[in-house]
Image (spheres, rainbow, N blue to C red):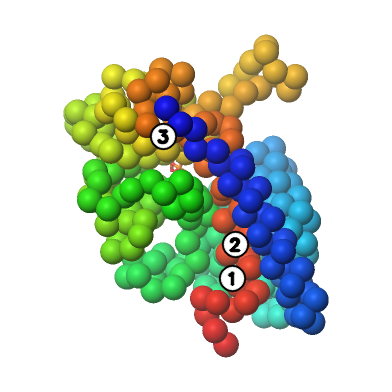
Amino acid sequence: MKIIDGKKIANDIKEEIANEVKQIIEGGGKTPHLAAIIVGHDGASETYVGHKEKACTQVGFNSTVLRFEDDVAEDTLLRRVHELNEDSDIDGFIVQLPLPKHISDQKIIEAIAPKKDVDGFHPVNLGRMVIGLPAYISATPAGIMELIERYNIETSGKEVVVIGRSNIVGKPISILLAQKTNPGNATVTITHSRTKNLKEVVSKADIVIAALGNAEFLTADMVKEGATVIDVGITRVKSDKTKSGWKLLGDVKFDEVAEKAGWITPVPGGVGPMTIVSLLQNTLKASKREIYPE
Ligand code: NAD
């Protein structure tokens, strides 16, 4: 078993981005600027936005966080999104999900100008990705592709099984790995909560991507000897062994699956750190007008 070290790759990429930002600024260019909208005081959302702000500082980006109370009207939020669309100093922005129930996540996502949608959630970016046009690719699938590429894991002609069909992970990673690209060219099966014989399907896979959000679901008996196992899941559980009183578990029963796997991502330290770095990469692309030239 060999560990895919997402933390290390994420740090390498941050260094690469920081160097590029330095060169841009030395050449008289504009500092890339990421904005985030956060509504309410959800602990997990606060943590994610905090991590994103810190990562921006690390690579030399400007970052702005716009905070709204839980009871903000949908119209107010939509107005703010339109203002950010027009603000030439903001290269890209994200709206931290989920939003309170009285606000439609989809309506807000669709109000974001595709050229500033660095989360890659807008249907235009998703659609462009599906037909192989340049697009912002959502952070988690982009991070997984980067890990596969940097570790030279062969995907061409391989059997990939993705567990989970969410719009932000399962569906996009399935499409990316099936595309005529490198990495890509895989034979991909998407599985979900209604899949029958999941164990049988997964046990044929050369590469398994577990993104279902069910702690330690994937056990060694489900995995083929030598398979690559990418664990996307993050479940926070109580622990008396950590200072914080919490620990993070992935969707993979790490110790036993690691014995059988060829390559495996740990949780934490695998896909998680790559997600934030992908957002930085998208913001850098936005600042360079790489996807949508003007
Ligand atoms: P989701 O919660 O929207 O959907 C889960 C999917 O798993 C569904 O499509 C469902 O059909 C499938 N599923 C549920 N139970 C199943 C079962 N028993 N067998 C087969 N399929 C089953 O998914 P999401 O938003 O993609 O999140 C999945 C996990 O990934 C969560 O733990 C989430 O916290 C984590 N996540 C991590 C990152 C990261 O940066 N590492 C990013 C996004 C999500």
Q: Which residue is at 22% across, 51% downward?
A: 157
Residue on which disc 1 sits = 285
Classify residue 278 by image quadrant: bottom right
Gap in angstroms between the C-alphas marked 1 and 3: 30 Å
Q: Is residue 123 above or below residue 6?
A: below
What is the x, y in percent for residue 137?
A: 47, 61
Element marked by disc 2: helix
User: The disc labelled 1 sits on which kind of residue?
Assistant: Lys
| Mark 2 vs 1: CB contact within 8 A | yes
Q: Which residue is at 46% across, 46% downward?
A: 151
Residue on which disc 2 sits = 281
Quadrant location of the C terminus in the rendered image: bottom right
What is the x, y in percent for residue 210?
A: 39, 36
User: The disc labelled 3 sits on which kind of residue?
Assistant: Trp
Query: Pointer 1: residues within 10 angstroms few (<14), some, or many (20+)?
Result: some
Element marked by disc 1: helix
Classify residue 261 by image quadrant: top left
User: The disc labelled 2 sits on which kind of residue?
Assistant: Gln
Name which of mark 1 and mark 3 comes first in the sequence.
3
Residue on which disc 3 sits = 263
